[in-house]
């Protein structure tokens, strides 16, 4: 019995294997995989570290660790991913949400008081991450998510139902805002594909091999989606409305120019927590971080 693994020893062993395999965040990944394999919570691991791990649980954890060592993302192994304050199901049909995208929420939420009713649209919604994170924080808001992928929309609808937001979120299969009326939304958000086609093969395996190419490939220069989005956002945004789109950190000036060419007078580039250009918007940077002019 003394040789049986415990939550603590299993966590440490998994962490050591991931660290040796040069996996980023080995401690966090090991904990998440241990929780999934054993049904334990983070609190259990801290307050009951010597709880025995059964042979079946140990085998499940070992299989999870092997998959992670082959560079399969933890979110793909577990089928879920935390984003902002919500938990989302993710499948191979959707982009796995990333912390970088939370910079959009930093721009959007301060612009809309909690009790203000407003309508929003998330263009290329994928898992529904941005739309649902906003709706979870703003109970008077309603939203629409669009995507060209029926499979992605199925994931987004399931996430909305799981979060009990399906009464305020609807989803539509269309390309960006095709078929939608003019000046229909107070807020327009998007995290479009922005990786240049030739650069996709240079990405980390977790992204290159596991995120859908449709959600990554931004064309030859990475800007194809923004060329389509800028006039559409101009068309569907209400006068005085807010837009915010995620960008690659080198694309700020180019994307800003596309929106200015569509007649937006006050376009800004705001930074993420790593002080890299991350969002192009017509709203202020709420963190008062340096703005790239």
Image (cartoon, rainbow, N blue to C red):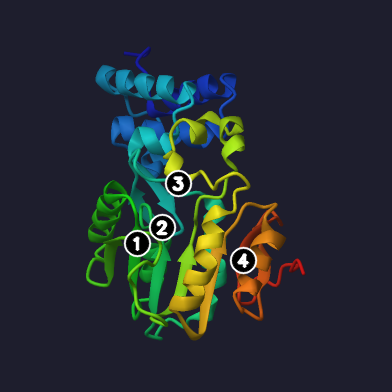
- Res. 288 in view: yes
**Nearer to the camera, 258 or 114:** 258
Q: Which element is circle 1 on? A: strand
Q: Are marks 3 and 2 in contact (CB under 8 Å)?
A: yes
Compared to residue 256, the image places residue 79 above or below, namely above
CA–CA distance in space, label 2 to label 4: 16 Å
Compared to residue 291, the image places residue 204 above or below, namely above
**Residue picked out by circle 1:** 146
**Residue picked out by circle 4:** 280
Q: Are marks 2 and 1 in contact (CB under 8 Å)?
A: yes
Residue at 28% across, 68% down: 169
Compared to residue 45, the image places residue 2 above or below, namely above
**Nearer to the camera, 236 or 250:** 236
CA–CA distance in space, label 2 to label 1: 5 Å
Q: For mark 4, does the 10 Å Cα neighbourhood hold few (<14), some (14 to 19), or many (20 or more) residues?
A: many
**Residue picked out by circle 3:** 215
Quarter of the image where the C terminus is located: bottom right
Q: For mark 1, does the 10 Å Cα neighbourhood hold few (<14), some (14 to 19), or many (20 or more) residues?
A: many
Q: Are marks 2 and 4 in contact (CB under 8 Å)?
A: no
CA–CA distance in space, label 3 to label 2: 8 Å
Q: Which mark is residue 112?
A: none
**Residue picked out by circle 2:** 124
CA–CA distance in space, label 1 to label 3: 13 Å
Pick whichever of labels 3 and 2 is earlier in the sequence. Answer: 2
**Nearer to the camera, 83 or 191:** 191
């Amino acid at each position: 019995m003394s040789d049986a693994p415990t939550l603590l020893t299993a966590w440490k062993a998994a962490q050591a294997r991931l660290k040796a395999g040069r996996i980023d965040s080995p401690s966090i990944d090991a904990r998440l995989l241990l929780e999934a394999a054993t049904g334990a919570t983070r609190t259990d691991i801290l307050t009951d570290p010597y709880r025995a791990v059964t042979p079946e649980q140990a085998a499940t954890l070992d299989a999870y660790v092997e998959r992670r060592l082959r560079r399969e993302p933890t979110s793909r192994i577990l089928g879920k991913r935390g984003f902002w304050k919500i938990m989302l199901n993710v499948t191979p049909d959707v982009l796995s949400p990333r912390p970088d995208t939370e910079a959009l929420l930093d721009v959007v939420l301060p612009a809309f008081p909690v009790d203000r009713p407003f309508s929003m649209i998330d263009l290329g919604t994928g898992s529904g991450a941005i739309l649902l994170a906003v709706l979870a924080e703003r109970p008077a808001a309603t939203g629409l998510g669009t995507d060209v992928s029926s499979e992605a929309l199925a994931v987004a609808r399931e996430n909305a139902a799981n979060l009990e937001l399906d009464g305020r979120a609807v989803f539509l299969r269309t390309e960006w805002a095709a078929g939608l009326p003019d000046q229909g939304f107070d807020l327009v958000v998007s995290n479009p594909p922005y990786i240049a086609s030739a650069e996709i093969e240079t990405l980390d395996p977790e992204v290159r091999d596991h995120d859908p190419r449709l959600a990554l490939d931004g064309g030859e220069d990475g800007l194809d989606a923004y060329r389509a989005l800028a006039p559409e956002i101009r068309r569907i945004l209400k006068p005085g409305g807010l837009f915010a789109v995620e960008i690659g950190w080198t694309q700020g000036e180019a994307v800003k120019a596309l929106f200015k060419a569509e007649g937006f007078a006050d376009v800004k580039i705001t930074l993420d927590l790593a002080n890299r250009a991350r969002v192009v918007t017509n709203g202020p940077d709420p963190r008062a971080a340096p703005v790239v002019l």
